[in-house]
Each structure stands twice: as C-alpha cells, then as structure tokens.
Amino acid sequence: MSNSTASEVATGAPDGAGHSSGSAHPAPHGDLWSVDEHLADILAAVRPLEPIELQLLDAQGCVLVDDVTVPLSLPPFDNSSMDGYAVRVADVAGAGEEFPAVLRVVGDVAAGSSGDITVGAGEAARIMTGAPLPEGAEAVVPVEWTDGGLGGGPVGSMAPRSNGSEQASGEVRVHRPAEAGAHVRARGSDVQAGERALAAGTVLGPPQIALLASIGCGAVRVRPRPRVVVLSTGSELTQPGEELPEGHIYDSNSFSLTAAARDAGAIAYRVGAVVDDAETLRSTIEDQLIRADLLVTTGGVSVGAYDVVKEALEHVSDEDEAGSGIEFRKLAMQPGKPQGFGSIGPDHTPLLALPGNPVSSYVSFELFVRPAIRALMGLQEVRRPTVRATLRADRALTSPAGRRQFLRGVMGEGTVSPVGGAGSHLVAALARADALIVVPEDTTRVEPGTELDVVLLG
Amino acid sequence: MSNSTASEVATGAPDGAGHSSGSAHPAPHGDLWSVDEHLADILAAVRPLEPIELQLLDAQGCVLVDDVTVPLSLPPFDNSSMDGYAVRVADVAGAGEEFPAVLRVVGDVAAGSSGDITVGAGEAARIMTGAPLPEGAEAVVPVEWTDGGLGGGPVGSMAPRSNGSEQASGEVRVHRPAEAGAHVRARGSDVQAGERALAAGTVLGPPQIALLASIGCGAVRVRPRPRVVVLSTGSELTQPGEELPEGHIYDSNSFSLTAAARDAGAIAYRVGAVVDDAETLRSTIEDQLIRADLLVTTGGVSVGAYDVVKEALEHVSDEDEAGSGIEFRKLAMQPGKPQGFGSIGPDHTPLLALPGNPVSSYVSFELFVRPAIRALMGLQEVRRPTVRATLRADRALTSPAGRRQFLRGVMGEGTVSPVGGAGSHLVAALARADALIVVPEDTTRVEPGTELDVVLLG
C-alpha cells in the first residue's frame, strides 16, 4: 500500500498539507477518509484464503468452493417409510376390518438388507422403515393396519426380533387396502444423480452437512477459517488477575477482540500487552506471522510520542518487498479516528492497526476487522445487518460535524435507545449494548423520534 | 421417568388402550402427547450444569453464575484522552493563534507512568493518551493546538520518542484556551467501584469479556458448555466416503446433529452408525457416559422389529437405580412422531432418542435437543425465535388432522415459502430452508396468504 518514507514522521515535521501522516496518496476530502472509503480499501486488498479439503465436521461454518453434484439418487432405492408389510396392491384391494386379506409371510426385510426376497401373489414380506421394497411388492401396509402375524386384531407395534418372537413367517391379516406406492419412498424422490446438491459459495450449516453426508460426501473443498493474531500494545497494560501498578490499566482489547474474531468465524490467537518499544513490537509481529492470515493490533496509532505501532510499521515498506506497507489514516468517524491498514511480511499478510481505547477498538473491529475476516472466509455478506430504527431518548443526541458517529444502543420494537454517552471509554455501556446507532457525517443533532441507521451487533 | 416393564413390549401384545408403549403414565390426549407437553417434560427434567471457574476467553458464550461487582473504578485515575500537554487553566486562558501562551515543559507523562511530575504555574507536561493527569494540571491541550515544542506553528503529531527528538523540555506554545477537565477522562466516569458490572445470567460475548478484563477479572464462574454425545444407529448405515453396499444408505444424522449441537453451544462428540443390536448399543452408550452431559440417539425408536434403541433402553429402568429410565412416546407432530426421553446411568445422564429419518431427526433436534442443551447451559432463552409470516405458495398446504406439522420454508419480507414437500426424507429441501413453517394440530388446510407461526432456524 503505502510507500511513505519514515523520515517524514521521524523529523516530526508539521504536515501542513493536512494529509494523514505516512500516507502515499492524499485523503479524498481534506485530511480525512470516510468510513466507507477505508472499508472499501480493506476489502479491495483482502482476498479469500486458498481452498483446502476438510472433513465434513471440520468444515462447519465454512464456504463451499465448488458446486457439489449428487453422485447417486436419494433415496438410492425404493424403500419403506413405515414398519409393516410389503404387499401387492391387488391382494389387499378389498381388505376391511371384518374381512381382512390373509397373506403368506415370505420373509423379513430389515433396513440394510439386500434384495433376496420376492413377494408373489398372495404373499407379503415383513418390512422395516428404510428397508428396500422387495421385488414384486407395490406398497407397504403399516403394522398398525395388520394383526402383526399374531392372528388377533390390529397391533401397535412389532415384537423385537431379538426376543425370539419371529413374525416373519406364517400368515398376516391386513385390515385396510393400499394404493400403489403407499408408504414407499421412491428412488430419487429426494435428489436425482447429476443434480446440483449445493452451489459454490454455500455456507455449511447442519442441514447442508446433512445433505453432503447423505450423498456420501465425507470431505469437501472449502475456504478455511482465517487464523487471526490479536496483539494489544501499551506499557501501561496489566493482565487481568494481576495486581494493578499505579498509572496502569488492565488489558482488555486483546481479550475482547480475540473473542470477537472467534465470533466472526476466525481461529484467533491472543498476544497480550506488547510494551511500547518499536523494536519489540516489530520482532513480536515477525514471530507471529507464521500463524497469521490476518494481524490485528490495538493502540499506538495516534499522534503521540509513544505510538509505537505507527512508528514500527511505517518503516516496514522500506525494508520489505513492494506491495508491503502499512498506511495510517485519520477517518471521519467517532470513535475510531486513527486507523492503520496494509500488509506485512513475505506473504503480504494483511494487518489492521486499531486505536487503543477499548470502545474505539471494538467499534473499529466491527466496522473493519469483521468484514476482513469474513472476506478471507469467502463469504458474500461481510457486514453486520443494518436496520432503520426510531430514536427513543430523553433528549437530542449531538454529534460532531463531519464525523460519522457510532453510539452504543439497545434495540426495542422498531426503536433504539442510547446507552452511556459518546465517550469512547465507556466500556460498561458497551457491555449493555446490542446495536450501534449511526449518526451521519452531516448531522450534528438528532431529535428523539428521528429514524436512523442502526448496526445490529447480535 | 418411566417405570414400564420390558415384558409389555417384548410380548408384542397389542396395546389396545392406545397408550404409547413403554410409558408408565398415559398420554393426556388419547395415545399422543403434544409437542409442548413433551418439551415441558424435558425442560422439567434437565437442570443447568454445575458452575466451574474458567479463564475469560474459555468462558465465551457461557452464562455467568454470580453478579460481578466492580473492584476498582474505571478509569482508575484521571487521565488524558488526547496526546498533548497537561496545563493549568489560568495559564492558557487568553491563548490565541497570534498570541500563544508560552509554557515551560517540565516533563513527559507516558501511559503507564506513575505520578512523579507536578505541573506548576506557567508550566506544562507533555502527556500521552491514557497517561495519568499530573498533580497540579487541570486540563489537556491536544498537540494540534500547540507548536509541539518546536517553536513553529501548530503541529499534526508528536515526534516518536525513540527517534531521540525529545520534546519533553524547553518551551511549548499553546494557541487555544482549555476549560477545566478538557480532554480529561475523570476517575470512575465509566464505572464506580462497588457497582454491579454484570448480572448473574449474562451471556459472555466480546463486549462483556471486554468489561470483565477492564476491571481485572481474569477468570469467571460460569456454567460450562455441555458435552453432548450423538449416536446414530442402524445396520444399514455406511460412513460417507465409503462405497455404498446394496440396500444401505449413508449415515447423515451423526454428522448433522453433531454440527447442530455445536451450533447450539455444546461440545459435541460423534459416534457413527451403531449396528442394530441391543447389547452392542447398550455397551456403546455405557462407554460414552463418561464424556456425556447429554446423550442423543437417532433411529430405532419406532414400532419395528429392529428398533433396538427402544428395545435396549426400555430395559434400563429395571436394572438401574430409581429415577433412571427412558420413556418412549408418540407425539402429535409430523415429522418426528416417535420420541424417547429419560435418563440413564449412575449420574442419571439425560438421553433423547430421536427418530432415524434425517429430516425427522433434525426437526426433533431443533424442537427438543437444542432447548435441552441451552437449559444445561443455564440460558433463559432456550427456544428458537418464532415470528408470524404470511404463506406465499402456489397452492394450499395440507396437513394431517391432530398433528402439528413442521414444513421446511424460506423466509421473505414478512412471508414464508415452503421448499420441498411434507415428505420427511427430503433432506435436499432442508438444506435450502431457513425456517420451519408450523401448521397447528387443528388445521388441515392452509391457503396462500394465511398468517402462520414460523420458527427461524438462522
């Protein structure tokens, strides 16, 4: 991406032109990029991962790469949909409660048996659900329409074979007639060989896995889940569970973004609290490249003297091959103004550098990282669903001009209510939110009752 | 649950009273239980799992057992929300573009530093985002409002400290005034020590994990994910990827239900294609008990001679302790009429025995197993959401009297369209569905345009 020289920043020279420092090309509108432009740049650069063959259950949630054609018709043979007796239609045509048809039982067809029984005139074969319809038979009468071969009235069930009470010989009385094909699932009535079972691009959930297994497909070519390494940076970060030194805060971003990456479908690895030292950060990132399809950092992307992510990664394009490099930008959004994006390392692994504030980083994840993860998976729908909702609030919302503001909200019936304020540190409010209220760039005030876009986080 | 004797079934005696065979108490309405009665019985018997303490990221998606109280206020100290200079309000009161306030820089406050700097009259301290506000300072002026200590006009950023261009001494020119508290995040403005951070029963998603990490909580007591063992039964079942012998079909239930159990939040284990032999099934189930919080079987629950699940498990209550036992029922539903439920083994592990047909077993899973899994997790919302939708179809739907029918459907805008027919073997149609259309028991015909309940599978 960027080809900027590090010297521009290293000298601390004022960027009087107002361009995002470290950027090779200027922002389209003054010194700020829009949320949509930034996302479009990310999605233009992130390609779906190369397909791999996975066992069926390992492919759950993944995207199918090829159309899957049905190799054999389902069901693969005419079979019974009931436990009962396989009969010829003519033999049971006049059967009734008082005058049952009496048929000679010639054998027993269990599910899984091969077709060595033939049903002739005046004959019946005991048959179980799923068992192949024997040669000569045209319909199945459920066991409840018969005496079960016991010589009495209609029965409720068959006796278990393993109890030794075989009913697969002798006579059976059938009390009702049956039409041709009754209680028979015809070969190919579910799918026909040669049909397309699933289209390329299908996401494999339980029903799709059921279909693939049914047609004998034990492994499939899919896009794998992306491996995402989440690194939080900051010398002030202490791990939860440890004692908090003066001036420190607990590291929360590495936890929340790892959880969010898993939620988005990724295999995520957490690297907590890299200290604010450019060399340490660079070598940590290099170490992590081996297990990363995507790198996400938090913190150190702003304009401060200790913003080591920016410092460390703006140098990358000088040392590495063409095509690598991280560009740092200011976006017309709140929270989440400073953002970095580009690629790094010999494989040009994509990297997103998010701001360090917990709410800013979470909102940035939702807007930029989640779509990137889903693009890597080959999904078509990479964004969260957005709906319209009516603002329900005690007073008007205010928003800075020229910024798209994302406020935490709770959904009601067609309404949304803000929780907490606009302050980007209100992680307690974030934990109660199930939506992001979007206040457009050109809107500085939103009265209660106004309809707005809302991003659903559920 | 059930105390039925096996002999009732073993003799194959007609159950003239019309009761579900193997049941100790009669069905409330003739010989059929309703869907709601069966689910109520399951939910009355399934208790949430015992809580365990898990590391934060291992608790993702789990339910919090106790209220969590905030041990320390957040932020834990007044800190800067910008990179800039910490100042006294009086010193910058009259500052403007032409006549900047000139302050002596007394030091550098990085995030994570402890408070050893004091800002006196006429002084400023360089300060980074998140760094504690030094003693004496009342506000922060962003670096963009200053000359960055370089003696020129306003700057866009600070020079990285590691480049050696220290700006933490000398003078800084401030071009704009600041009110008290400007760009300062006050201690406790997010949460106060002693407040309730999260209530018992909260599901831990990424934002809740962010909050817990922020307050230093590295491990939490939650209900664990249930371990679910899925066993498919049937001598006719062949594993996908292998060659299909005559009369056989591929095992799909063990795959689809394992995937569905994972989707519901469980840790699921697949045991494929146990042969139709009661002794083999019993010993397989005994072997699996050690890793199961819930057992799910498919197949062998109907009225056939080879229905070994029923045969094997109806004996259990005779041999084991009181409280164990599986009851087999017929439900007033289609598909999914035959169902078994109870508990087994020394720990009274719950077991659901589903019918073997792929669509029947999947629909049964959605209606009964998924709620059981979610009840084990301690979730309040155990059912899939149900919405009203208008039937969009070329012709009327028909449904058997006295059965609640579940048809596969695809949702539109407030509408639902059926896919495939009512046949319970249409797994290809299931793979295209995202909803179950519910036709009530007393409805035998539904005209296009009618409003219906629809269970959303998404």
Image (spheres, coloured by chain):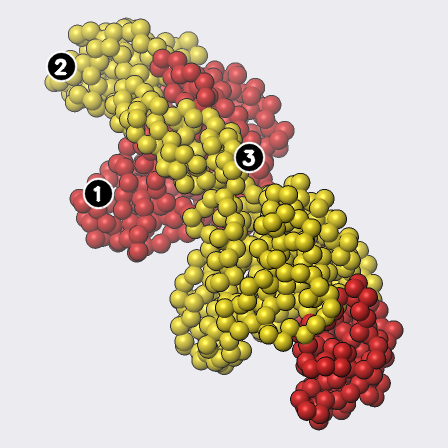
Chain colours: A yellow, B red
Q: Residue B268 carries which label?
A: 3
Give coordinates of residue A262: x percent, y percent: 58, 47
Q: Residue at x 60, y 68 (%)?
A: A20
Q: Quadrant of the N terminus of chain A?
A: bottom right
Q: Which amino acid does label 1 sit on?
A: Leu
What residue is pinned by disc 2? A90
Rounded to the nearest angstrom, the CA distance separating label 3 from label 1 is: 36 Å
Within 10 Å of disc 2 (Cα), the crowding (few <14, some 14-19, many 20+) is: some
Q: What element carries label 2?
A: helix
Q: Which residue is drawn at 56% across and 21% down?
A: B284
Horizontal side of B206 relative to B453 (left or right) equals: right
- Asked if the residue under mark 2 is in contact with the one under mark 1, i.e. CB atoms within 8 Å, the reply is no
Q: Alpha carbon of mark 1 to alpha carbon of mark 2: how far?
A: 31 Å
On residue B397, which mark appears? 1
| Lateral position of residue B122 relative to residue B205, left or right | right
Residue farthest right in this picture: B116
The numbered mark 1 sits on a residue in which chain? B
Q: Eyeballing the image, is B352 above or below A174? A: below
Q: Is residue B49 visible?
A: no
